[in-house]
Amino acid sequence: MTLTQEQVEHIAQLARLNLTEDEKVRYAQQLSAILDYFEALQQVDTTQVELFAHLQTGDSQLRVDAPQPGLGIDALLANAPDAEDRQFRVPPVFE
């Protein structure tokens, strides 16, 4: 499938891209090659392939979701670049 210059310009507009004329030509060729590859993939016979929803088989081994104690304030603030009154001190966002 070959994309036209107008189709590439439309895609670029949707993506808010300002393309040069050389980029439009190059992207038209590259996108056309990608679409040709997908057309070739559609011709592959997958009738003998078993359908599946995910790659994991069997039961997943998840840990028990149990509450655990967190870090204390002193341990949290030990790595802070700046702290004041047991709180993180950050630069102001608004002046």
Image (cartoon, grey):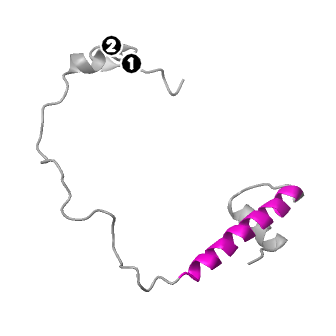
The relative height of residue 18 versus residue 35 in the rendered view (above or below) is above
Please say if the residues under marks 1 and 2 sit with CB atoms less than 8 Å apart: yes
Residue 53 lies in the magenta-colored region? no
Say which residue appears at 39% left-offset and 14% top-offset. 82
Q: Whole-Å distance between the Cαs marked 1 and 2?
A: 6 Å
The quadrant where residue 36 appears: bottom right
Say which residue appears at 77% left-offset and 72% top-offset. 7
| Residue 18 or residue 51, whichever sits in front | 51
Looking at the rendering, in which quadrant would you find the N terminus?
A: bottom right
The quadrant where residue 52 appears: bottom left
The quadrant where residue 38 appears: bottom right
Q: Position of residue 12 (x, y in %)?
A: 74, 62
Q: Residues within 10 Å of mark 1 (few under 14, many from 20)?
A: few
Badge 1 or badge 2: first in the primary sequence: 2
> Badge 1 is on which residue?
89
Question: SS for tag 1?
Answer: loop
**Left or right placement of residue 26 versus residue 72 in this view:** right
Q: Which amino acid lies under the numbered mark 1 shown in the image of this protein?
A: Arg
Question: SS for tag 2?
Answer: strand
Q: Position of residue 22 (x, y in %)?
A: 88, 57
| Residue 28 or residue 43, whichever sits in front | 43
Q: Where are the magenta residues, as a range?
A: 22-44
Q: Which amino acid lies under the numbered mark 2 shown in the image of this protein?
A: Glu
Residue 84: which disc?
Answer: 2
Main secondary structure along the magenta-highlighted residues: helix
Say which residue appears at 18% left-offset and 22% top-offset. 72
Residue 37 lies in the magenta-colored region? yes
Looking at the rendering, in which quadrant would you find the C terminus?
A: top right
Residue reaching furthest bottom? Answer: 47
Q: Position of residue 88 (x, y in %)?
A: 34, 20
Say which residue appears at 69% left-offset and 64% top-offset. 14
